[in-house]
């Protein structure tokens, strides 16, 4: 794990082979308890090709000077991403004030569009 939040990655290697590659990352919350959203792909070992992109939200806890994964939630595909976006849109007005509302709308719309485009 890393001591710096900005250096955290979701890449993973097994025996020198990249089996999970991070495509994008957004830090949602900083501090001793940090929340990071990753877009990533996993390697299909049979074909050698990477699967369609997925998203995961990871909660990190800083412990003994380094960030360690505490919990995560994976978003398995475009349909689930769209479902979450609809719920966030519906609930968003109850969670933010009007000044932040445009930012939330633009962020959710842009992120879901990028994810759907990447998935094909």
Image (cartoon, rainbow, N blue to C red):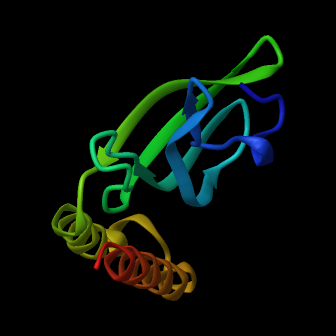
**Above/below status of 57 relative to 91:** above
**Residue furthest toward the front?**
47
Number of numbered callouts drawn: 0
Residue at left 53%, top 50%? 21
Q: Is residue 101 left or right of residue 7?
A: left
**Residue furthest toward the top?**
64
Residue at left 62%, top 30%? 16
Q: Nearer the viewer, residue 102 or 99?
A: 102
The picture quadrant where one finds residue 35 is top right
**Above/below status of 95 relative to 21:** below
The picture quadrant where one finds residue 61 is top right
Q: Quadrant of the N terminus?
A: top right
Q: Nearer the viewer, residue 36 or 49?
A: 49
Q: Nearer the viewer, residue 67 or 54?
A: 54
- Residue 5 x, y percent position in the rendering: 76, 41
- Residue 73 x, y percent position in the rendering: 34, 40
The picture quadrant where one finds residue 32 is top right
- Residue 114 x, y percent position in the rendering: 43, 80
**Above/below status of 105 relative to 17:** below
Residue at left 63%, top 39%? 34
- Residue 50 x, y percent position in the rendering: 38, 55
Q: Nearer the viewer, residue 33 or 6?
A: 6
**Above/below status of 62 relative to 52:** above
Q: Quadrant of the C terminus?
A: bottom left
């Amino acid at each position: 794990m890393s001591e710096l939040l900005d250096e955290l990655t979701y890449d993973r290697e097994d025996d020198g082979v990249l089996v999970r590659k991070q495509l994008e990352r957004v830090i949602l919350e900083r501090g001793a308890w940090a929340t990071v959203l990753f877009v990533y792909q996993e390697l299909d070992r049979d074909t050698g090709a990477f699967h369609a992109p997925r998203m995961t939200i990871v909660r990190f806890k800083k412990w003994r000077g380094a960030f360690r994964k505490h919990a995560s939630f994976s978003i398995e595909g475009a349909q689930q991403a769209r479902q979450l976006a609809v719920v966030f849109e519906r609930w968003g007005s109850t969670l933010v004030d009007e000044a932040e509302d445009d930012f939330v709308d633009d962020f959710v719309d842009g992120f879901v569009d990028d994810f759907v485009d990447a998935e094909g």
